[in-house]
Image (spheres, rainbow, N blue to C red):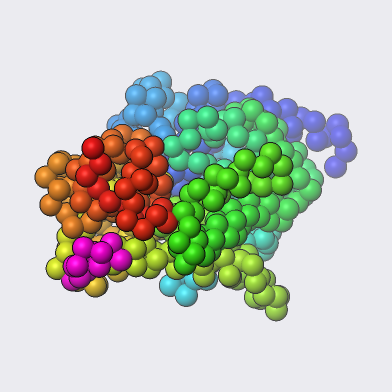
Amino acid sequence: MNEQAQEPMLEHFRSGNLTMGVIGLGYVGLPLATIVAEAGMRVIGFDIDEAVVDGVDAGASHIGDVPSSRLAALVRAGVLCATADMSRLPECDVIAISVPTPLSKTRDPDISFILAAASAVSAGLRRGQLVVLESTTYPGTTREVVLGELAKSGLEVGEDFFLCFSPERTDPGNQVWTTRNTPKVIGGVTTRCTAAGAACYGRFIDRMVPVSSAEVAELSKILENTFRAVNIGLVNETALIADRLGVDIWEVVEAAATKPFGFMRFVPGPGLGGHCIPVDPHYLSWKMRTLDFRTRFIELASEINASMPRFVVDQVRDALNDEGKAVRGSTVAILGVAYKKDIDDVRESPALYIIELLEAAGAGVVYHDPHVPFLNDERTGLRESVALTPSLLGQADVVLILTDHSCFDMREIVAKSKVLVDARNATAGTNARAASRRGVGWIVKGGLA
């Protein structure tokens, strides 16, 4: 198609009166729907969870990064609504798919949500629509899976409709880098698809980064999170080494981080959490196994990171041994169960595994997390956050810090606890290290004056 014919298409997506559909109103979809509506486009959010739909239509946000006041203003203005009725997809000029992509119990990709969304789009696909997959997945999914579904419509990609992959880069709780100002990679199945996607998304994203294909965009997302997973695996292994050597790992990291070049600071922790870093590298591993290629770095990093919850439990066991106590019959008070500070997200949180391991060993476990009032997971069962009181801290045999929420008064926690296991170096500023029982940066003696 010549440039004269292509330009009206680009102008349509760059400045036309468009309606955007967002399939999946979770941690990625709702922030996206919000900034699109604020940019002046009408948005219809689609979700299979009726409670989510009803909440959004009532202006009540279930996502911490989207305040209810912000959402309610858009709903009242009539520029954002939600529905579970997928038959309304033909109303949309642009459709973003932001559904979950979990792993199966065998750690293989589960793309059933992508397939279901693509099938729903295909059923009502019409000429001129732009479809953008945002769900993180293995390279080839957009072309091989989504296009395979959309092609059932009989329409031709790059001519009748446009298909791209644009990986989400959401960082829950980050107040600096948001959906709007984080550069956004986009790659189409054809060059016209890329142009259409970049033109449309450029209306509500500050900087677009077009790439040559959907596969480049897909692999770039996997690389981002694999980079983090491998480096976290390295520093976690160094933490295990430091523990054997009787060296404070936190001091080691801070010393290394003074080098102004050639080193990037990563810190150890109780394990990996969230939907991205623990999950995404496995998508690439699975894909490469189908091509008879073994991703050895990814597999090793995953093995090390998966071992950290057991290491934390070992630290609890050592702390109790120092007191002449066994794990069985002891009370462990966990502070923080979200996978990182100042958010409410517990997806793949190492706290879930640690609770399971401690209770299997006979400990009584309670938790406090101001951002997570209830836990309801197959590992932990349904339980409620308890109040953080001096009594809780003083009566627990061990206090275990798994998430370093900003609201925690670490000095008070150290002062009122008998013994701490600090998996986040959260007590570093309290001079508690001087009272450490072992000096390796994990077990800290409480009662600091």
- Which residue, as the protein is rendered here, is positioned at the far right? 2
Quarter placement of the C terminus: top left
Q: Which residue appears at 67% of the width and 75% of the height?
A: 294
Can the viewer see residue 349 in this picture?
no
Task: Find out whether residue 179 is within the magenta segment.
Answer: no
Residue 321 picture quarter: bottom left
435 displayed left or right of 194: left
Of 306 and 325, nearer the camera is 325
Can the viewer see residue 7 in this picture?
yes
Q: Which residues are magenta?
A: 318-328
Q: Which residue appears at 60% of the width and 56% of the height?
A: 231
**Residue 79: image location, x then y, percent:** 45, 26
Count of numbered marks: 0
Question: Can you say whether 390 is above or below 101 in the image?
Answer: above
Q: Which residue appears at 48% of the width and 57% of the height?
A: 247
Residue 232 picture quarter: bottom right
Quarter placement of the N terminus: top right
Question: Can you say whether 11 is above or below 280 in the image?
Answer: above
Of 447 and 115, nearer the camera is 447
82 displayed left or right of 234: left
**Residue 312: image location, x then y, percent:** 36, 62
